[in-house]
Every structure is written in C-alpha cells, then in structure tokens.
Amino acid sequence: MSSTLIPANPSDVMVIRDVTPNVVTLTVPFLRFGKVPIGGRGTIVRLTSGALAVFSPVALTPEVKSKLESFGNNVQYLIAPDIEHHIFISDWKTAFPAAKIIGPEGLPEKRKAQTDEKIGKEDFDVVYKPNTKRTTSVSPEFDADFEVEYVDGHANKEIVLFYKPDKVLIEADLFFNLPATEAYSRVPEADKPKPGFVAKLFMSAQKVEGNGQKRLLWHAISRGNRSSFNESVQRIATWDFNIVIPCHGDVIESGAKGVFEQVFEWHLKGRK
C-alpha cells in the first residue's frame, strides 16, 4: 500500500531547495523494497509563461504550498514520469483541478485497477506512446520550454524532460545517483537506515562512478527493447543540459553532460 512508501512526517524531513531561479526540488527519504535508501524527489518548474509544471509530485505539505504560492501558484501540469512515480497525483489534482495530468501508456489503466484509497481514477490528459511520442503535444507554452523524450525502451516507461531555459534535465528512473545524501539530510542520525549487505550491493550498482550502473542498464534495464532505448538515449545526449535532477540520489549540478555520457557510454557508442 502507498502508506508504507510515504514518510510519516514529510514536513519534518523534506528538503525544499532552489536549484535554479525557476527550478525547485522537493527531496524526501524513501526506502526501495523497504530496505534500500534511494530517496525520492519531486521537481517544480516555472515555465516562461509563469505556469508551473510538477514532475513526480511528492507530499503536498504546507511548506510546499508556500513555495508554490511564491512561484505564483499557477500549477498547470502534473507529470507522472513513469509507471512507478504517481502516488501523489490525486492529491495534487484535487488541489489544482485545472492541471493537466501527463504520463506514460499503461499508467492510467494501472491506477484505475488499484484499490489503494490514495490512488484515484483520474483521466490523463496526455499519454505518451511509442508510435506517437515524437508528435505528442502538451500545450504551446509547455512545448516551447521543454524537449520531451519518452524512453519506452526502459522497463519503467520513462518520460524525460529537458527544461531549455535553465538547461536542466529532469528524470525519474532513467538512472540514479546514489547515495541519496540530500534525501536523508534532515533525518535524525538515530533514525537513518543502516543498509545491509544486499542493500549495499544494490546501491553500488546505482552510482554514476564505475561501471556498475552501466552494466545494469545494458544487461537488465534496456534488455527488453535495447534499440529503442539506445535511440532515446542518443536523442537525449544531443540536448544542451548542465544539470541533471534524478528522482533517486543527489542532483548533479556540475559536469552533468559528461556524467550522462559516461553512464550511457555503451548505448551511445555501442558496446564492444
């Protein structure tokens, strides 16, 4: 159930931070499989028009509401970036009924089949699909500020955004940047998780350093449709980003393009 995935005290542990003047991150503790501290992150983006887009929404705390108000409170877009990051969509849609819900194929059906009371049955306004992903339009103002790549070759069906005005790449599970230092920075030391051997092994495969994540992406994550995955990664690599905001692990605020190219080297150049 979703209640097992959500911090009991989100206001006490969430880190709200301006990454750029137009991009704010909302970072929280999160244990994958209930054991691995990978953290979680929502991202608020203020478009050139003044409208707000929220990527991978997290808890809508009083502090988050205050931040939204300082940004104009004009939430127009709620992006569920893959089939996993969607729990808080209903809360945000209730608070901002005019907002469009955006997500990947299969997610609307998945949500409607849920019995979890936190997950509603809302219709999606924009659904990304493989055969129309290059022609899908969200709105003129959204399309003007964002490049979008639907990585349907990823196991989780990832929607990746490039916010062009501030040169920021925003992604969910495309790749991680563990450890999740920021996500646990407000957690009391005594309450911080102490990963066991298996958790540490998982975390070692989700770092940007070394070849662990590179191997995981090549041999497991992209295995189902590697040609499509490669095509998506190669397109993302053409974008001029300086910052990467992942949902799991820390934000990459310098040298982000080089990190991306290192992690996806085999997909960009072809594995030898």
Image: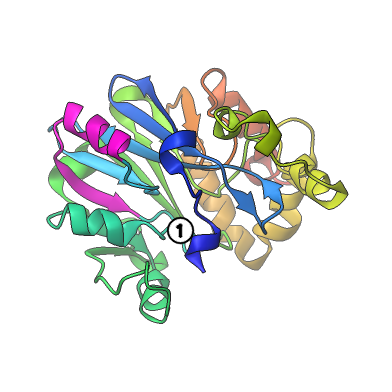
Q: Is residue 66 magenta?
A: yes
Query: Which residue is nearer to you in this view: 169 or 227?
Result: 169
Q: Is residue 79 above or below residue 115?
A: above
Q: Is residue 136 left or right of residue 194?
A: left
Residue 37 % position (x, y): 66, 44
Query: Which residue is nearer to you in this view: 66 or 261?
Result: 66
Q: Is residue 243 visible?
A: yes
Q: Residue at x 37, y 69 (%)?
A: 119
Query: Which residue is nearer to you in this view: 137 or 36?
Result: 36
- Amino acid at pointer 1: Asp
Res 269 quadrant in image: top right
Residue 45 % position (x, y): 29, 34
Residue range (magenta): 62-79
Query: Which residue is nearer to you in this view: 124 or 260?
Result: 124
Residue under label 1: 82
Q: Is residue 98 left or right of residue 216?
A: left
Q: Residue at x 55, y 50 (%)?
A: 173
Residue 52 % position (x, y): 21, 39
